[in-house]
Image (tube, rainbow, N blue to C red):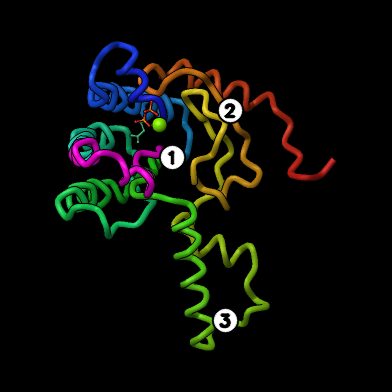
Amino acid sequence: MDGNGRWATRRGLPRVAGHHEGVKAARSVVRAASGLGLRYLTLYAFSTENWSRPVDEVSMLMSLLERSVNAELPELMARNARLRVLGRPHGLPAGVRRGIDHVVHETRHNTGLTVLMAFNYGARDELIDAFRSLARQVAAGELRPEDISEKKISESLYTADLPDPDLLIRTSGEMRISNFLLWQIAYTELWVTPTLWPDFGAVDLYRAVAEFQGRTRRFGKV
Ligand code: IPE
Ligand code: MG
């Protein structure tokens, strides 16, 4: 969800205003994804690198994310949608963590769209956590190094029980991945749009999905 800051700056507004608009965009994309019958929607909300922003912006983002997630609880329930979080939970302020855990807990039995919020997420950290857990199993004699497979690594990630993403949508025109699901996107289709996140809506999601449906995926085969 990139481009909130630029959206605000172009209008002579503080960056905070862009983040508020970004929340609205996230809400319409969740609705549209649920309406389309998508199984999973991952929103990259806060990366491990975002901690190096000015402290005011970081604390504003933390409380905005927590408040917005809680405000969405009734609609998530109405849509039979579930919230889960990808990322390192420790390191988040306790109040923010509690607030988000509450929504995760309340929606845990819902069977429609799963919204995965990447929050305090970094793909390299995720891989480090996975390798540490595998190393611990090897050290404990529970796993042989030769049994470390793609499947074992996938199962050690935060996304253990989730399918790899089919489509990655990148807003604000940046041609980079920014430490997002590095292992999982090996064969994901990429779709980059210059649209800034606050301007991204249901129609943009439909366009991305429609283009995705027209692509031929070969997974390295012919
Ligand atoms: C939102 O966009 C992404 C978040 C970390 C919430 P940015 O804040 O990165 O916006 P730009 O890149 O400065 O335009
Ligand atoms: Mg950015």
Could you say which is closer to the camera, residue 130 or residue 48? Answer: 48
Magenta stretch bounds:
43-63
Name the main secondary structure of what is drawn in magenta. Answer: helix
Q: Which mark is residue 191?
A: 2
> Dot 3, how many residues are within 10 Å of its Cα: few (below 14), some (14-19), or many (20+)?
some
Left or right of 40 on screen, residue 192 = right
Mark 2 or mark 3, earlier in chain: 3
> Dot 2, how many residues are within 10 Å of its Cα: few (below 14), some (14-19), or many (20+)?
some
Is 45 within the magenta? yes
Could you say which is closer to the camera, residue 76 or residue 115? Answer: 115
- Are discs 2 and 3 less than 8 Å apart at CB? no
Could you tell me residue 189's position as x and y percent? 63, 35
Helix, strand or loop at mark 3: loop
Could you say which is closer to the camera, residue 83 or residue 187? Answer: 187
Q: Does any portion of residue 111 appear in the rendered image? A: no
Which residue in the structure is indicated by mark 3? 143
Which residue in the structure is indicated by mark 1? 42
